[in-house]
Amino acid sequence: MIPMAKKFIYTPDDFNEFHVLKIPVLLYFVLLYLNKYFLLVVLPSIGAGDLTAIVRWFKIDALMMMSCFPALAVLIASLYRIPTPKKFPILIWNKGLILLLISSAMDLIVLSSYVILERRIFDLGTFVLLLINVGIIVYLLRSKYLKQMFKEFPEELEKK
């Protein structure tokens, strides 16, 4: 008896109107989580709030903000996931899985190093943040759906 290779079969509900795999809800949560420092600094600034209090409270610095940039690029590319002649969103989307892994690994390394260097107290909140980063890395590495989804980008519609 010959073992059959496992096939990953998608239902029609897994595809959007452009015939590419839909972005799963869990990935939206991952994108929001990986952009947490950026969102904590940018959203209050829209309302012209006092950023220094927020930065001090969450102890956000440049290294923490830098861990958001790869995930921010993927978030922006996901908004351009429509048939478009622009090459940059396509390039970012095709490298999206790697960019999200880099972002999560950077956040994990920065938080861990801050705990080791005693710049941050190792409490339940820090432990949960570290655990979430590990969970995200495992999810990104193991998901066959995400690997296939990041290969697909809607093709530009032909002009008539």
Image (cartoon, rainbow, N blue to C red):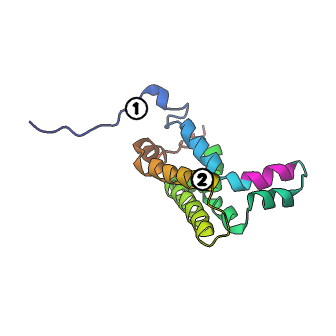
Left or right: 77 as drawn, with respect to 102: right
Residue 20 drawn at (x, y percent): 50, 37
In the image, what residue type sits under mark 2? Answer: Leu
Mark 1 lies on a secondary structure that is loop
Q: Residue at x 68, y 69 (%)?
A: 119
Residue neighbourhood size for the residue with mark 1, other residues' Cα within 10 Å, grouped as few (<14), some (14–19), many (≥20): few
Mark 2 lies on a secondary structure that is helix
Give the main secondary structure of the magenta stretch.
helix
The residue identified by callout 2 is 129
Give me the C-alpha separation between circle 1 and circle 2.
Answer: 32 Å
Residue 85 visible here: no
Q: Which residue ends up furthest to the bottom in the rendered image? A: 117
Q: Nearer the viewer, residue 21 or 124?
A: 124
Q: Which mark is residue 75?
A: none
Residue 37 visible here: yes
Q: Residue at x 65, y 60 (%)?
A: 69
Q: In the picture shown, does residue 144 fall above or below 106?
A: above
The residue identified by callout 1 is 10
Residue 50 drawn at (x, y percent): 89, 56
Question: Magenta region: which residues?
Answer: 39-46
